[in-house]
Amino acid sequence: MIKIRKSEERGRLKLNWLQARYSFSFANYHNAEYSGFRDLLVLNQDIVSPSGGFSTHAHSDMEIVTFIIRGTLEHKDSMGNKEQIHAGEVQRMSAGTGITHSEYNASDVEELELLQIWILPSKLHLIPSYEQKQIKDFKSEGPEKLLVSPAGEFSSLKINQDVKFFEIALKKGEAWERPIDAERGNWIQVIKGDVNINDLNIKTGDGVLVEKEENLSFRAQTEVELLLLDLC
């Protein structure tokens, strides 16, 4: 079963400093059909105006992954981390017993665009932790890179749940097959480009929910970059 979550059908928030699209219920946006998927609770696409951002706020018992599409994010947290995360980098933060943090656009000229993804942890009250890494430094297996995994395999970022995040990059016209476990669920988020997945046409910003399938067949109509989340 494959279901397309069209980009334009996502929840929407527009402020003077933020344009947000919500794949799942979040804040004041509620959608009974899309209130998380397995251990995936939140997938937000945010465009933050120059110097804009999220002031200090708290999280606990959540695995948070941030993928920078363009621009630079300024991060500061109660663990003592003060970092900049640039386009082409991934950040993983385990909130565990509790943290506070702030996230701002580091530029006063350019917009910041990112995906923020929340995963429910396998255990509660873990010790908070933080990692970040450039995508180019992850190990490649063909067009696929493992970014996040429970065991930190192949130098991926380590997450406290049985999930894996992959970045898949395809050139225009490139075809690729990927076997998957029919007992698990997959969520695909298209960052850029148009791609045919199992004979369905998927466009920039679309999400794809996959269950009870044994294979994914990709054919790129343009240059394509997407995230694939393999969920228990």
Image (tube, helix red, strand yellow):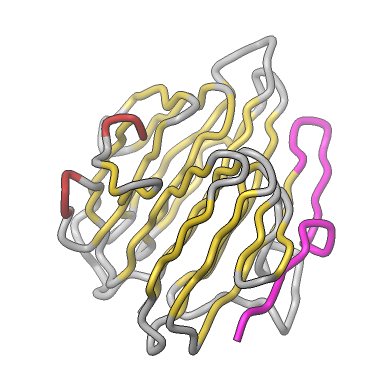
The quadrant of the picture occupied by the C terminus is bottom left
Q: Start and end of the magenta stretch?
A: 1-19
Q: Residue 84 in the image: x percent, y percent?
A: 41, 22
In the figure, is residue 153 to the left or right of 67? Answer: left
- Residue at 46%, 24% in the rendered image: 86
Q: In this view, does 85 lie to the left or right of 201?
A: left
Looking at the image, which is closer to me, 178 or 85? 178
Q: In the drawing, does residue 163 fall left or right of residue 12? A: left
Name the residue: 74% across, 63% down.
Answer: 201
Write the residue at 43% across / 55% down. 59
User: Which quadrant of the structure image shows residue 48?
Assistant: top right
Residue at far top of view: 109
Quarter of the image holding residue 153? Answer: bottom left
Q: Position of residue 194 (x, y in %)?
A: 70, 49
Q: Nearer the viewer, residue 176 or 208?
A: 176
The residue at the point 42 percent across, 27 percent down is 85
Q: Where is residue 169 in the image (x, y as percent from the top left)?
A: 48, 43
x, y percent for residue 98? 33, 55
Residue 3 counted in the magenta span: yes
